[in-house]
């Protein structure tokens, strides 16, 4: 089976009311787009919602894999959380100054994923990443789903 990866990026203060919509989008990615690998961070409510939805989806789709994005893995010892298959530390990140690690990790994931699911407001860093991903989408490099 070919690995198809989906990355999640969203605002820290994402409302929990989007959980049902997020679950529907995840289900579509699994069943229609054959995505089998998901990568999510752990720095805000969107990341928590995505992880919850994916852990629930694993009950119905045990073949999917869930990885925790770790931009600081070399400087922090992180245990793999329950429900995750492991952690992922992007290649080359060890040379990036710590204040820029999340930015570089997010960009890496956009550049190395076939799909992106996002919830973002009109301003902020998440918006900048979505705009970058949409430019990549126009080149046929990624498919972006906005909630």
Image: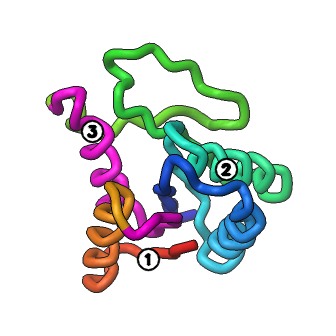
Which residue, given by chain and number where applicable, does mark 2 sit on? Answer: 49
Q: Position of residue 59 (x, y in %)?
A: 84, 51
Q: Is residue 98 left or right of residue 84?
A: left
Along the line of sight, the residue nearer the viewer: 4 or 23: 23
Q: Position of residue 81 (x, y in %)?
A: 64, 27
Residue indicated by mark 3? 91
Of labels 1 and 2, earlier in sequence is 2
Mark 3 residue element: loop
For the point 51% across and 74% down, the residue is: 146
Of tags 1 and 3, the one toward the viewer is: 1
Magenta part of the chain: 96-122
- Tags 1 and 3 in contact by the CB under 8 Å rule? no
Dot placed on the residue nearer the N-terminal end, 1 or 3:
3
* Residue 143 image label: 1
Residue at coordinates 35% horizontally, 64% vertically from top-left?
123
Q: Quadrant of the C terminus?
A: bottom right
Q: Nearer the viewer, residue 118 or 112?
A: 118
Would residue 106 be counted in the magenta stretch?
yes
Name, please, the residue furthest toward the right.
60
Secondary structure under tag 2 reads helix
């Amino acid at each position: 089976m070919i690995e198809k990866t989906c990355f999640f990026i969203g605002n820290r203060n994402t409302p929990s009311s989007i959980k049902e919509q997020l679950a529907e989008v995840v289900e579509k990615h699994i069943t229609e787009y054959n995505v089998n690998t998901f990568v999510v961070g752990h720095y805000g409510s969107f990341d928590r919602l995505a992880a919850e939805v994916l852990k629930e989806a694993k009950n119905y789709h045990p073949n999917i894999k869930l990885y925790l994005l770790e931009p600081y893995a070399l400087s922090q010892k992180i245990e793999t959380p329950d429900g995750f298959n492991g952690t992922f530390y992007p290649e080359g990140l060890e040379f990036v100054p710590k204040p820029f690690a999340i930015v570089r990790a997010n960009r890496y994931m956009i550049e190395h994923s076939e799909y992106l699911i996002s919830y973002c407001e009109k301003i902020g860093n998440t918006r900048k990443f979505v705009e970058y991903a949409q430019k990549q989408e126009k080149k046929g490099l990624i498919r972006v789903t906005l909630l």
